[in-house]
Each structure stands twice: as structure tokens, then as C-alpha cells.
Image (cartoon, helix red, strand yellow):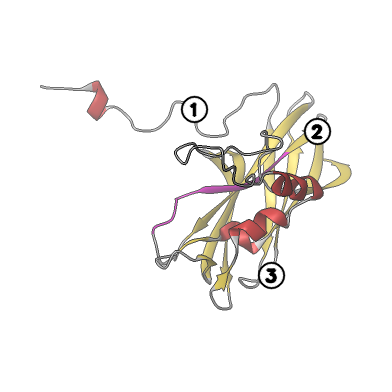
Amino acid sequence: MFYDDYTDCSHTPLFCFGHGLGYTTFDQSELTVTATDTLSPMSVQLTVTNTGARAGEEVVQLYVSDLVASVARPELSLIGFVRVALGAGQRRRVRFDVHPSRLAFYDEAMRFVVEPGQFRFSVGASAGDLRQRCVVELAGGVAEYSQAGVVRCGPPWRRRWATRLRWPAADPSRSSNESPKRVGHQRRRPLTISPVKDTSVHKAQ
């Protein structure tokens, strides 16, 4: 019988996106999602508990799936993450503040929009280890966003980088075939959500 490892082997990755190891174990529970419409910010909250005998850190990852989009969408999209340090037996309430533009995509008319409908929010330790899921429905109409405006509306350091990265004025002595180069600082910090976490720590029951 003919067998080819390339075509017949499992298609799942050896290590999923976001995979990591530690010296303790964590539990993620009590997921709640507060969402209303395509124009209002959303709140995602959950409880993280260190269920092991050692102190450690857990990277809580927040994913979203658009269940009824007008175009094909990814099965999972990472929209936020936060590192939580807990001692043995400790727990903490974590909150993600999600702007609706994080759910936006380009539709058939190449508009950057958020459509009403059902969205599934998932939290876990990796893309292959999702611990909690919650499906919500956004009301309202189709909301259009400016991607450049989304970048500029972030924290102060992000606005500074956006203003520094600009094209220089045309140089008459430069050849028309020579591409201009960006000025200012070249390294940029990743444009990710900065989740807010409750600083209070409670002993696990």
C-alpha cells in the first residue's frame, strides 16, 4: 500500500501558536463578555488561577471569530494578550478593553468595516488550548473605520511613532527610479491591545 508522509500525515502543528511551558499550572474561568453594538467598546473579563504548587506566569490570549461575515474570515484572530504573574494558589481578575475596530475587515467594496452579527470570543493559553468561549451578538448597522485613525488613536507613544514615520519631500536631484526612504526611527512597537488587569490578588478557594 502506497503511503506518503508528506500528504498523509497529520496537518496539525507540533506546537500551536502561543504555546509555552512553565513549572506550574493555571486555570482560566468565569469568562464574561459585555458587548452591545458595532460602535461601542467591548469588555472581556475572566479569572486566572494558579492551581499549581509554584509561582509562575500565564500569558492569557484573547481570540475572536466572526461567525456571520459577508466575506471569508479567519477561524481565529488574536486581538489581545496579557502576562499575569501569580503565586501558588493565587487568582486574579483580568479585563480586556476591546475597541470595535479590532473586529474590522475589508469587505467586497474594500471598506474597513465592522458588521453586526455573532462573534465568538475565546481565551486560552494558546490557539490550540482555548479554555473558555462566549458568543455575543453585536447590534446596529455596518460601521466603517479608518485604519490610519485606529493607529493614531492609541496610546501617546503610538501617536508619536505615527507622526515620525513620514515621507520626505521630493528631491529634484534624485533619480525617478530611486525609491524614497522613510525618515525618523525605523523600529516600531507592535500594535496590540493593552489589557487592563485588576491588581487585587485573591486566594483561590
Please tell me whether mark 3 or mark 1 is closer to you in this view: 3
Return the mark for residue 42. none
- Count neighbours of disc 2 (C-alpha within 10 A) and say few if under 14, some if 14 to 19, many if 20 or more: many
The amino acid beneath tag 2 is Leu
Q: Secondary structure at mark 2?
A: strand
Query: For the view shown, which residue lies furthest in the right direction?
Result: 200
In the picture, residue 161 is in which quadrant?
A: top right
**Residue 148 placement (x, y as % from top left):** 62, 57
**Residue 98 placement (x, y as % from top left):** 68, 57
Q: Secondary structure at mark 3?
A: loop
Q: Residue at x 49, y 66 (%)?
A: 111
Return the mark for residue 40. 3
Work out how far the residue at label 3 is from the one at label 1, CA to CA, in angstroms: 36 Å
The residue to which callout 1 is attached is: 15
- Left or right of residue 87: residue 17: left
The amino acid beneath tag 1 is Phe
The residue to which callout 2 is attached is: 86
In the picture, residue 109 is in which quadrant?
A: bottom left
Q: Residue at x 66, y 40 (%)?
A: 190
Residue 76 on the magenta span:
yes
Disc tally is 3
Give the magenta part as a residue range: 72-82
